[in-house]
């Protein structure tokens, strides 16, 4: 039995949740986030809570129960507070700047790297920190992973792009005999 699936999701003030068939729409002002359940879970909205229930008694239905509960919880949290990932740039001459809807990165290559900022994301740069913010947890995490992938931190000097809470295990360099 899913421990996550059986927990009800509280709906914060200012957020509306509506069910249209198998689609759950979460609205706050003019922002809308949808979760498609494909009929794999039962949905009930009552008394400021959303409760999901299993459709069958199989292991698969239990897995879907917890998964869709987590997706719906993330959609509600994203519209209520939003999600943020922070990246840190380390290295001589490594820079980042936001120019319109493009994040321009100078990461030691012979050319600048231009990352197109998707709709729904907000990227800000202050000194050597890049902050990626948005309402969709998956979109924020994917954008941060792509930016980190342009120059992963190397283990000898620690140069590259890393998450601010990431710890880089350093290796010892060559030793003279």
Image (cartoon, grey):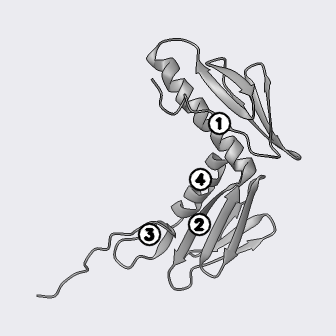
Between 116 and 163, the residue placed more toward the observer is 163
Can you identify the residue that label 4 sits on?
A: 141
Question: Could you give the CA–CA distance between mark 2 and mark 4, rounded to whole angstroms?
Answer: 10 Å
* Quarter of the figure with the N terminus: top left
Question: Could you give the CA–CA distance between mark 1 and mark 2, rounded to whole angstroms?
Answer: 27 Å
**SS at circle 3:** loop
Query: Are dots 3 and 2 in contact, CB under 8 Å?
Result: no
Evaluate whether residue 108 shows in this view.
Answer: no
* Quarter of the figure with the C terminus: bottom left
- Mark 1 or mark 3: which comes first in sequence? 1
Q: Residue at x 44, y 69 (%)?
A: 153
Question: Could you give the CA–CA distance between mark 3 and mark 2, rounded to whole angstroms?
Answer: 15 Å
Q: Which mark is residue 86?
A: 2
**SS at circle 1:** strand
Question: Could you give the CA–CA distance between mark 3 and mark 4, rounded to whole angstroms?
Answer: 17 Å
- Mark 1 or mark 2: which comes first in sequence? 1
How many numbered markers are drawn? 4
């Amino acid at each position: 039995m899913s421990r996550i699936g059986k927990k009800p999701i509280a709906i914060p003030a200012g957020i509306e949740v509506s069910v249209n068939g198998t689609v759950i729409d979460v609205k706050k002002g003019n922002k809308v986030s949808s979760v498609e359940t494909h009929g794999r879970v039962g949905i009930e909205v009552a008394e400021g809570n959303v409760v999901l229930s299993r459709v069958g008694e199989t292991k698969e239905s239990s897995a879907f129960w917890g998964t869709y509960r987590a997706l719906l919880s993330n959609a509600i949290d994203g519209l209520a507070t939003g999600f943020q990932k922070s990246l840190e740039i380390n290295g001589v001459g490594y820079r980042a700047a936001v120019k319109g809807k493009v994040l321009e990165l100078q990461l030691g290559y012979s050319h600048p790297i231009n990352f197109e900022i998707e709709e729904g994301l907000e990227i800000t740069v202050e000194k050597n920190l890049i902050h990626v913010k948005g309402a969709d947890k998956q979109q924020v995490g994917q954008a941060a992973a792509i930016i980190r992938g342009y120059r992963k931190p190397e283990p000898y000097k620690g140069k590259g792009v890393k998450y601010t809470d990431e710890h880089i295990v350093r290796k010892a360099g060559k030793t003279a005999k």
